[in-house]
């Protein structure tokens, strides 16, 4: 366990560059299993989740070398499709490997996936998608094993646009015999990035970014060099850091078109937002106005991964805000922690009613999951006094040295290692 000490009361201002997207890097790393040649991934963020995924690939026999922000993966030496127990429990996205491993080795075994404690996270859609392509499953001892003779193209109708299930379907279908159609696919930018990576490697995915994917199975592929898209959630978090501290933050090396839903919320709060082709800034001079209805939904609607951070911001609003969380049922764990800091909120089912207060105060709080931790760090930066965040190592799963980024912007977060 690592604790962070956050000093409040400093306006953050200046410029910060964001790293590559965790949620694009993870499925793209899983995709390297399909390509038995060296692949170079630039802008691959040095996050604990990404490092865990690299370690999983090594355990399968791949060679994975990091040099700065570039990771080179050579899976030509991978020998088997059995995922290691402990690491796979830590990273939920290890489940993506089922699709690519079963494609490469005809069989794969994985422990039930881990990841953030944000509610019941079933994998039924992943299994349905793979079974449509001919994969059969057996379960036991907390593990799931997949087997296939030949992957065959099929129509996959997803009842819900699950990001992970869409990615798993793509990873298995790209090398299947014939054509696969995925209807009801997720449209997140990270799906588009995975499709761009696969297409550049010689596979054939049409329609990424729309609910209808058409995938032509291909056997030939090649190792490539690919740059991972910027992290939209990290971009949004640092913009909220500027807004919540009544400062002015410019985020660079990013793509503002990926966070339109957040930018319109920040404007509705009364902040000044300015976009450039690869940068975005927010300037705040006052506390936010309340937002009467925020709903998390699949992209391009407001992202569940920014809900906790917006919740922290609205805790300081001049009126009462309402947020409804439609994606994950247990994603309000930050609410009670924010109350320890003086926030006023009430959770009724999937809806949070947030009565804005003029100021928060430092307290001892717990980062129950990654975004909960990010929200508490933001609240701490805007509070009077010092906030201690327990289990802050969870923040490192999605933010590369947030303490350093905050320091560049004039704030202070100190790591108190055990
Ligand atoms: C991905 C992101 C995560 C983000 C989420 C929603 C990665 C590594 N993680 O997670 O940061 O919060 O998208 O944008 O990319 N579901 C089922 N059955 C399934 C799969 C999902 O019922 O087989 C449900 C989940 O319980 C949840 C909803 O679908 O309620 C969304 O999940 P999904 O889109 O699959 O999210 P992840 O891929 O897990």
Image (cartoon, grey):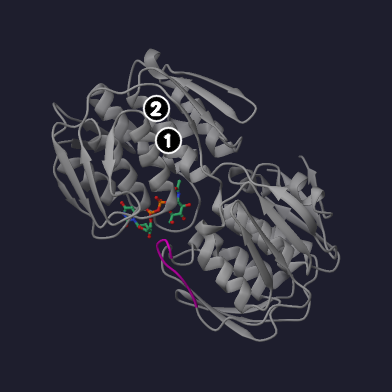
Q: Which mark is residue 28?
A: 1
Q: Local crowd at mark 2 within 10 Å, few (<14), some, or many (≥20)?
A: many
Decide whether residue 297 is among the magenta residues. yes
- Asked whether, in this view, residue 25 is left or right of residue 187, the answer is right
Q: Nearer the viewer, residue 227 or 27?
A: 227
Cα distance between the residues tagged 1 and 2:
7 Å
Ligand 1 image position (quadrant)? bottom left
Q: Which quadrant would residue 51 be assigned to in this image?
A: top right
Quadrant of the rendering where the N terminus is positioned: top right
Which residue is denoted by mark 2 in the rendering?
32
Residue 367 visible somewhere in the drawing: no
- Asked whether, in this view, residue 226 is left or right of residue 195, the answer is right
Q: Local crowd at mark 1 within 10 Å, few (<14), some, or many (≥20)?
A: many
Residue located at (23% from left, 37% from top): 173
Percent position of residue 194, x then y: 39, 40
Percent position of residue 40, x then y: 49, 24
Contact (CB < 8 A) between labels 1 and 2? yes
Is label 2 in a helix, a strand or a loop? helix
Residue located at (72% from left, 49% from top): 16
Q: Nearer the viewer, residue 312 or 182?
A: 182
Residue located at (66% from left, 68% from top): 273
97 relative to 336, above or below: above
Percent position of residue 280, x then y: 64, 58
Quadrant of the rendering where the C terminus is positioned: top right
Is label 1 in a helix, a strand or a loop? helix
Question: What's drawn in magenta, residue-wise?
Answer: 294-300
- Asked whether, in this view, residue 198 is left or right of residue 225, the answer is left
């Amino acid at each position: 366990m690592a604790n962070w000490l956050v000093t409040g009361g400093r306006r953050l201002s200046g410029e910060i560059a964001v790293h590559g997207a965790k949620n694009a890097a993870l499925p793209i790393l899983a995709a390297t299993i399909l390509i038995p040649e060296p692949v170079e991934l630039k802008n691959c963020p040095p996050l604990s989740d990404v490092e865990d995924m690299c370690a999983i690939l090594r355990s399968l026999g791949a060679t994975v070398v990091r040099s700065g922000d570039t990771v080179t993966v050579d899976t030509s030496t991978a020998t088997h499709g059995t995922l290691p127990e402990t690491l796979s429990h830590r990273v939920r996205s290890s489940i993506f490997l089922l699709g690519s491993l079963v494609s490469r080795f005809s069989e794969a075994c994985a422990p039930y996936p881990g990841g953030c404690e944000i509610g019941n996270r079933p994998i039924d859609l992943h299994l349905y998608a793979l079974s449509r392509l001919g994969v059969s499953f057996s379960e036991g001892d907390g593990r799931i094993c997949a087997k296939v003779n030949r992957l065959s193209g099929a129509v996959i109708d997803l009842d819900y646009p699950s990001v992970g299930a869409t990615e798993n379907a793509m990873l298995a279908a790209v090398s299947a015999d014939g054509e696969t159609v995925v209807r009801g696919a997720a449209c997140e930018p990270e799906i588009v990035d995975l499709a761009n990576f696969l297409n550049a490697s010689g596979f054939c995915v049409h329609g990424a970014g729309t609910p209808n994917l058409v995938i032509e199975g291909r056997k030939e592929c090649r190792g490539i060099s690919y740059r991972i898209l910027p992290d939209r959630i990290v971009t949004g978090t640092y913009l909220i850091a500027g807004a919540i501290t009544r400062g002015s933050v410019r985020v660079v090396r990013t793509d503002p078109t990926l966070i339109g839903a957040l930018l319109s919320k920040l404007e509705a709060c009364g902040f000044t937002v300015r976009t450039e082709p690869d940068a975005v800034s927010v300037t705040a001079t006052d506390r936010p106005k309340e937002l009467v209805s925020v709903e998390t939904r699949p992209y391009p609607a407001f992202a569940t991964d920014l809900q906790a951070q917006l919740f922290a911001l609205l805790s300081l609003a001049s009126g009462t805000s309402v947020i409804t969380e439609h994606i994950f049922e247990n994603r309000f764990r930050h609410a009670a922690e924010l109350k320890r800091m003086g926030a006023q909120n009430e959770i009724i089912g999937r809806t949070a009613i947030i009565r804005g207060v003029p100021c928060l105060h430092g307290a001892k709080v717990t980062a129950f999951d990654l975004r909960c931790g990010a929200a508490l760090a933001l609240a701490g930066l805007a509070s009077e006094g010092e906030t201690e965040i327990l289990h802050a190592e969870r923040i490192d799963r999605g933010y590369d040295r947030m303490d350093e980024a905050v320091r560049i912007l004039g704030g202070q977060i100190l790591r108190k290692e055990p």
